[in-house]
Amino acid sequence: MNSVTKKINIKLNEYLETYKIDILDFCSNKNQDELKYGLKEFINNYPSISIEKDDLLKRKRTNNLVPYFDRCMAKKANNEQCTRRRKDDDKYCGTHSKGTPHGYMNIEDKNQITSEIKKISVKATEINGIVYYIDTNGNVYDTVDVYENKDNPRIISKYNYDEETDTYELI
């Protein structure tokens, strides 16, 4: 049974339960003569069930973003870094721990270690209702690392800026 059918069945069952309870309440509060004439009117005037568009839509799947420092170090077929979370004490995710057919990310590939220290200015920006620290290179930094003024704050994501709508979006 798919989720849409399940949602409609739940809504119908809830409606029928309240309908039964309302009829029993109506019958228990009336004497015999009122019951004879009022029950038919009560049933005919009872509000019908309404099914909205939301009842027919599937629930959207949430897409969890894995921070860069927690990503698998393997390369995908398109030569980009794998987007899955790495295992606890491993450099790779469950799939790539068995093998890395397209190679693995070198430190040079990730551009994370440089021989000289560069100072990068970041600004606090609200993205989807959450305040993140971003730089001009499209990097999103770990808030705790920035607060603690660490030398190399972790890059947790990348962002895109849409000039038309003046909004930021995490990638």
Image (cartoon, grey):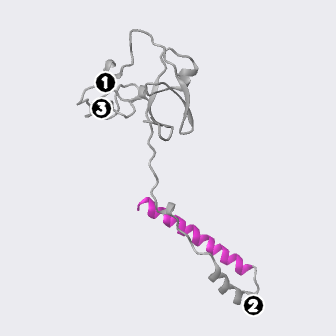
Residue segment shown in magenta: 1-28
Residue, disc 2: 33
Q: Number of numbered discs present?
A: 3
How far apart are labels 1 and 2 at the CA level?
A: 84 Å
The amino acid type, in three-letter code, at marker 3 is His
Above or below 64: residue 42? below
Q: Quarter of the image for the C terminus: give it.
A: top left
Q: Residues within 10 Å of mark 2 (few under 14, many from 20)?
A: few
Residue, disc 3: 96
Say whether marks 1 and 2 touch (CB < 8 Å). no
Residue at the spot 73% in from the left edge and 79% down from the top edge: 28
Q: Position of residue 17 (x, y in %)?
A: 60, 70
View extreme (front): residue = 164
The amino acid type, in three-letter code, at marker 1 is Met
The amino acid type, in three-letter code, at marker 2 is Asp
How far apart are labels 3 and 2 at the CA level?
A: 77 Å
Residue 20: quadrant of the picture: bottom right
At mark 1, the secondary structure is loop
Residue, disc 1: 105
Q: Residues within 10 Å of mark 1 (few under 14, many from 20)?
A: some
Residue 22: quadrant of the picture: bottom right
Q: Position of residue 71 (x, y in %)?
A: 39, 29
Residue at the spot 70% in from the left edge and 76% down from the top edge: 25
Q: Position of residue 132 (x, y in %)?
A: 54, 30
View extreme (top): residue = 116
Q: Residues within 10 Å of mark 3 (few under 14, many from 20)?
A: many
At mark 2, the secondary structure is helix
Above or below 69: residue 32? below
Residue 159: quadrant of the picture: top left
How far apart are labels 1 and 3 at the CA level?
A: 12 Å
Q: Could you say which is closer to the camera, residue 2 or residue 139? A: 139
